Image (cartoon, helix red, strand yellow):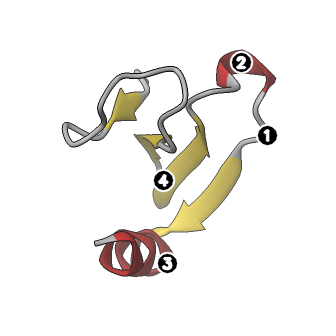
Amino acid sequence: MTWRKSSRSSGADDSQCIEARSQTGGFQVRDSKLGHDSPIFDLGSTDFKALLTAAE
């Protein structure tokens, strides 16, 4: 699956964004600044929705 970054991201190198992708049973998230070097966190759908709500 392809990583997706928020459309609200400024795209600047110093922006604080995560990237997300769907997977069976939930989502994975990582730090966009670290890219392939970022740890990947697995979140269930409920936890991912809570993360998005908290980030608003």
Amino acid beneath label 4: Phe
Instruction: Indicate which disc residue 47 carries.
Output: 3
Q: Give x and y (percent) for residue 7.
A: 19, 37
Amino acid beneath label 1: Pro
Q: Secondary structure at mark 3?
A: helix
Amino acid beneath label 2: His
Name the residue carrying label 4: 27
Q: CA distance from mark 4 to mark 2?
A: 17 Å
Query: Sequence-wise, which precedes: disc 3 or disc 1?
Result: 1
The C terminus sits in image quarter? bottom left
Crowding near pointer 3: few (<14 within 10 Å), some, many (20+)? few
Amino acid beneath label 3: Asp
- In the image, residue 15 sits, relative to residue 22, either above or below, namely above
Q: Nearer the viewer, mark 4 or mark 2?
A: 2
Circles 3 and 1, Cβ within 8 Å, touching? The answer is no
Q: Secondary structure at mark 4?
A: strand
Query: Sequence-wise, which precedes: disc 1 or disc 4?
Result: 4
Crowding near pointer 1: few (<14 within 10 Å), some, many (20+)? few
43 displayed left or right of 47: right
Crowding near pointer 4: few (<14 within 10 Å), some, many (20+)? some
Q: Secondary structure at mark 2?
A: helix
The quarter holding residue 46 reads: bottom left
Query: Sequence-wise, which precedes: disc 2 or disc 3?
Result: 2
